[in-house]
């Protein structure tokens, strides 16, 4: 303990800066620039509201990423529960003071921005469970009494988010939490049991679904069911991507988005727009950037010494990967439209904030990789 | 404690690493899946989605092309176009279509039925597709519409062109145009890419035959539209292309004149150039008003047409089938001569009837014609003479000659209403009626009755081919500059009477097909026809022209509708006293001028009685009219280098 403390204190600013993962930073930055380009295209080739605020957000939260990176991993570890509780309180706040838009209550009005706490909860839950599983000993992991807290911690925010209603985000929050439990070594049996329990409860859950949510699932199964209604988004998105071809229609030439055939082009369907304009190779480029990011975070997980850091990095990398692929599979017509933003690319402050926070903590794991957390 | 805890930590981190490895493998699989999907959408199916994207993006408004005009031989337009005022409506541009219709009803003269129909059309088509509220409104309605246009959102006043026929004398041969029907779209392939609301297609006659060429190429305006249907910008405009215009061989003046002559009769007249087959006139009566069909037919007028027992909608020149009657006697005689069955001077005795095979066969002249040879047989149209000739000739040899001369098959190309008629023979009867041929039927065939069926145009062609010396010609109605070989041949023959080349070689040099073995036989028939029209006792002697310029040679005919009963024959019942429907059809064929034949004519008057009385006077007048215009026609022919 003594030794490690000395290692930590011996880290000079220069050391810290040198140990930053520049490939990760570079990938994030390039992705940010690409996202600004895409946003500029959604505004019809002008610097309008969406582009301007996206630029502002990207740079503000990119700065936040560095701040988070330089905060000691010990701090993130020690404050994990608190952060979770803070985000949970914010989620509760949404329930009572939230803003309602198009039928769902997801936002808190913070005057300078509308905060969507469910996005932050994606990180909060991973932090909480990473600390939890870091702390309990390996023998206890599969003890039923030690499973009680994680289940409560997982289920409570999911229920809160799902009833906003925001099915997509609640599922993505769950994905992050389950990943931590899986990595910590919780037996497959428990996942199987809870999977069956979930399936058993599914009919009841479906009865709670809003009609539009039911229709989305039906539409996913058969998009041509209602080509002008719920299937419209999937069909138009596939048309846009397919018509992009190998090299795309060219920057600002995406007729599907330019002529408003593409729904939600700023947020969930930003990949569609990019793919229409830059084609197959453009899409591969984006995939490559995301793969780089995921790879670098996993790499940090490999080199960081604490299990908290490992659990956090692996889980966050996996969750990040899931956010990306769920969004892409959705716009490619491989999953139902559930409403999930594409990290960094999509317009949306809370999502950007949460992702940058998550990336910052991962980078903190890199900078303080040899520091024990307790 | 420290060791144990650090050992614990190491085990834990190994476990985490193992599980992470599994997750990484799963990620790789998902990545491959996403890339595979991108490959399938953006590479394999890219053309499908490009098309879908363009379909989204572009919207086309088609413009109906202008129909080509049809002109007569003297370049007078006999089917032309006129400017019409129309009201179009694009439903999606109107905020309240019900209200709009109420407003339109007060401005235009719209019936409730029409409104109902329009609403049904709107419900069926896409909201941006224009519909035609009214395709032909008056100038005053049009100007009133323009005055109120500001309160009529979605309404578009359009100045367009539509088919217009200056005269209805050529209605049958020109045919008419009307709105495209569902059946048209099914049967006419060329309409597939051509369909525009408000476009007309040819339904009958030349309009139908030439439709594909005359209809023109469609124009379009292509706009880029956004997801809400709003036009963003015009991408392309293509005015289309007016259809090809056609010049015909018809003479509008003759058409008008003939049509006037035939007024109120159920009759038909064909006039043909005997050298090149140019159809100078083709008139069927009574006629109808083709302009009525262009802008949607009124039920009342339609009913009056289909109920009229004179059948105004039928083009009797090519779709009317009539037994050729005595006009066939020219071919019977020719066939007998050609086959060596008779000599011109062979005689038979006509006692008014003969009895053969236990049946009585009557001559039209109850008293009989006495001793009859070929010339007299044709001149007096002696039935008994032709019974004898036919008996010797046999129906199969007769049918061969008749077919050679153009009977029993369609004369023109591409007229769906044209009928082939019947030239009977033993094989035909076996095949179509399933019975053996009776010898008595040969005798009926010999005077053009029985199973014989022909159109007036076929009879005209038959006469023309006799008149030109027995050469095959191909009748044509579309003007063609192609040089006329028959005229060249005759000119050459006149200039080089002693050409050593054998006749058949000479004919093949001029690409001519003779219909005779010995041209003398043709001349004998022509001479007999001359006597029939110009010598006392001839069946049409009363209607001859003394003036050499107009002298014609003809043959009368009457085709029986009902066999006379013995009682009627005894009572000498006159045709005029029979009910209209039971009277014979009157026929007359002729060529003129006799000395230098130029034109052949056939006249049919349904239930007109005898050919000499009803048909010949009409032929006489038409022949004069045609010959008077011959010089003019010749001038145009010589302009295009045709020797006359």
Image (cartoon, rainbow, N blue to C red):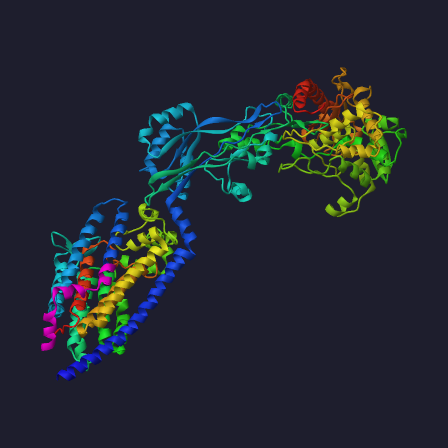
Residue A77 location, x and y as percent? 13, 70
In the rendered image, the quadrant that contains the C terminus of chain B is top right
Q: Position of residue B524 (x, y in %)?
A: 84, 27
In front here: B442 or B328? Answer: B328
Which segment is the magenta one?
A: A1-27
> Residue at (52%, 41%) from the top-left corner?
B191
Image quarter where the N terminus of chain B lies is bottom left
Where does the image place residue B394, in percent across and percent down from the top left?
A: 83, 39
Figure check: A353 above or below B72: below
Q: Is residue A71 above or below residue B199?
A: below
**Is A63 left, or right, of B349 in this rendering?**
left
Magenta stretch encompasses residue A9: yes
- B596, A10: nearer the viewer: A10
The answer to whether B520 appears left or right of B564 in the picture is: right
Q: Residue at x 27, y 68 (%)?
A: A202
Decide if residue B530 is on the left or right side of residue B623: right
* Residue B49, horizontal then vertical, whole percent: 40, 52
Q: Is residue B529 visible?
A: no
Residue B342 or B297: which is nearer the viewer? B342
Identify the residue at horizontal 59%, vertical 28% (top origin): B171
In the image, residue B419 above or below residue A365: above
* Front position in the image: A352 or A250: A250
Residue A37 visible in the shown view: yes
Look at the picture and state if B499 lies above or below A154.
above
Is residue B134 a member of the stretch shown in magenta?
A: no
Q: Quadrant of residue A205?
A: bottom left
Magenta segment, prevailing SS (helix, strand or loop): helix
Relative to B595, A371 lies left or right: left
Q: Residue furthest top?
A: B547
């Amino acid at each position: 303990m003594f030794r490690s403390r000395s290692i930590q204190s011996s880290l000079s600013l220069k050391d810290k800066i040198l140990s930053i993962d520049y490939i990760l930073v570079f990938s994030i930055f390039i992705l940010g620039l690409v996202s600004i380009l895409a946003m500029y295209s959604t505004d019809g080739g002008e610097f309008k509201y969406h582009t301007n605020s996206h630029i502002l957000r990207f740079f503000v939260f990119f700065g936040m990423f560095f701040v988070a990176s330089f905060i000691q991993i010990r701090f993130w570890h020690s404050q994990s529960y608190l952060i979770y509780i803070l985000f949970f309180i914010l989620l509760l706040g949404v329930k009572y003071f939230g803003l309602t838009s198009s039928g769902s209550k997801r936002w808190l009005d913070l005057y300078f921005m509308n905060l969507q706490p469910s996005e932050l909860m994606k990180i909060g839950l991973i932090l909480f469970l990473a600390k939890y599983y870091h702390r309990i000993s390996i023998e206890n992991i599969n003890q039923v009494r030690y499973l009680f807290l994680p289940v409560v911690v997982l289920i409570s925010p999911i229920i809160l988010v799902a009833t906003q209603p925001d099915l997509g985000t609640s599922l993505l929050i769950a994905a992050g939490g389950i990943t931590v439990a899986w990595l910590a070594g919780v037996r497959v049996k428990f996942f199987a049991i809870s999977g069956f329990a979930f399936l058993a409860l599914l009919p009841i859950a479906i009865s709670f679904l809003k009609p539009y949510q039911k229709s989305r699932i039906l539409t996913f199964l058969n998009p041509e069911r209602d080509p002008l209604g719920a299937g419209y988004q999937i069909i138009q998105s596939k048309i846009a991507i397919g018509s992009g071809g190998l090299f795309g229609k060219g920057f600002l030439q995406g007729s599907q988005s330019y002529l408003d055939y593409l729904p939600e082009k700023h947020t969930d369907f930003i990949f569609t727009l990019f793919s229409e304009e830059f084609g197959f190779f453009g899409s591969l480029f984006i995939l490559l950037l995301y793969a780089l990011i995921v790879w670098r975070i996993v790499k940090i997980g490999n080199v960081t010494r604490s299990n908290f850091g490992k659990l956090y990095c692996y889980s966050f990398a996996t969750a990040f990967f899931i956010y990306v692929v769920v969004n892409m599979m959705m716009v490619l017509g491989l999953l139902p439209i559930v409403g999930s933003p594409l990290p960094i690319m999509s317009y949306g402050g809370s999502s950007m904030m949460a992702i940058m926070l998550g990336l910052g903590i991962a980078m903190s794991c890199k900078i303080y990789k040899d520091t024990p957390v307790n | 404690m420290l060791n144990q805890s650090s050992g614990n930590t190491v085990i834990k981190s190994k476990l985490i690493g193992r599980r992470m490895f599994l997750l990484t493998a799963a990620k790789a699989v998902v990545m491959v899946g996403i890339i595979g999907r991108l490959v399938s959408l953006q590479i394999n199916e890219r053309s499908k989605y490009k098309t879908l994207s363009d379909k989204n993006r572009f919207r086309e408004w088609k413009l109906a092309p202008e129909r080509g005009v049809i002109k007569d031989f003297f370049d007078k337009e006999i089917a032309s176009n006129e400017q019409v005022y129309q009201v179009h409506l694009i439903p999606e541009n109107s905020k309240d279509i019900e209200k709009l219709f109420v407003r339109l009803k007060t401005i235009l003269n719209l019936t409730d039925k029409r409104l109902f129909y329009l609403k049904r059309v709107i419900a069926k088509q896409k909201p941006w597709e224009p519909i035609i509220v009214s395709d032909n409104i008056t100038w005053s309605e049009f100007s009133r519409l323009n005055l109120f246009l500001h309160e009529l959102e979605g309404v578009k006043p359009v100045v367009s062109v539509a088919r217009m026929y200056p005269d209805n004398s050529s209605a049958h041969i020109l045919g008419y145009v009307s709105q495209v029907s569902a059946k048209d779209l099914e049967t006419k392939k060329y309409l597939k890419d051509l369909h525009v609301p408000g476009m007309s297609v040819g339904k009958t006659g030349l309009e139908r035959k030439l439709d594909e060429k005359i209809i023109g190429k469609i124009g379009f305006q292509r706009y880029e539209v956004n997801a809400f249907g709003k036009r963003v910008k015009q991408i392309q405009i293509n005015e289309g292309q007016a259809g090809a215009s056609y010049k015909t061989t018809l003479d509008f003046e003759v058409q008008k004149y003939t049509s006037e002559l035939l007024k109120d009769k159920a009759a038909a007249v064909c006039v043909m150039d005997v050298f090149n087959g140019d159809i100078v006139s083709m008139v069927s009566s009574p006629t109808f008003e083709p302009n009525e069909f262009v802008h949607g037919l009124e039920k009342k007028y339609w009913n009056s047409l289909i109920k009229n027992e004179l059948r105004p909608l039928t083009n009797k020149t090519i779709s009317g089938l009539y037994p050729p009657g005595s006009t066939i006697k020219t071919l019977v005689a020719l066939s007998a001569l050609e086959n060596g069955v008779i000599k011109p001077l062979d005689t038979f005795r006509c006692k008014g009837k003969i009895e053969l095979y236990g049946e009585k066969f009557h001559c039209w002249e109850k008293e009989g014609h006495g001793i009859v040879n070929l010339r007299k047989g044709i001149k007096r149209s002696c039935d008994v003479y032709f019974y004898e000739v036919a008996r010797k000739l046999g129906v199969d040899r007769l049918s061969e000659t008749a077919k050679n001369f153009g009977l029993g098959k369609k004369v023109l190309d591409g007229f769906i209403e044209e009928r082939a008629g019947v030239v009977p023979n033993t094989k035909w009867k076996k095949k179509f009626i399933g019975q053996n041929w009776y010898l008595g039927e040969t005798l009926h065939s010999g005077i053009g009755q029985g199973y014989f069926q022909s159109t007036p145009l076929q009879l005209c062609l038959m006469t023309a081919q006799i008149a030109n010396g027995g050469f095959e010609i191909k009748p044509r109605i579309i003007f063609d500059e192609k040089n006329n070989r028959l005229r060249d041949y005759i000119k050459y023959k006149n200039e080089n009477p002693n050409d050593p080349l054998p006749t058949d070689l000479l004919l093949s040099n001029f690409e001519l097909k003779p219909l005779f073995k010995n041209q003398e036989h043709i001349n004998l028939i022509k001479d007999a026809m001359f006597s029939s029209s110009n010598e006392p006792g001839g069946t049409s002697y009363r209607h001859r022209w003394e003036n050499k310029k107009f002298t014609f040679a003809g043959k009368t005919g009457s085709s029986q509708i009902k066999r006379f009963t013995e009682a009627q024959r005894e009572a000498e019942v006159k045709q005029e006293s029979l009910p209209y429907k039971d009277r014979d059809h009157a026929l007359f064929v002729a060529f003129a001028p006799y000395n230098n034949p130029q034109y052949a004519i056939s006249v049919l008057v349904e239930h007109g009685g005898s050919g000499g009385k009803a048909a010949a006077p009409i032929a006489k007048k038409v022949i004069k009219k045609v010959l008077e215009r011959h010089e003019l026609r010749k001038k145009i022919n010589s302009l295009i280098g045709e020797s006359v």
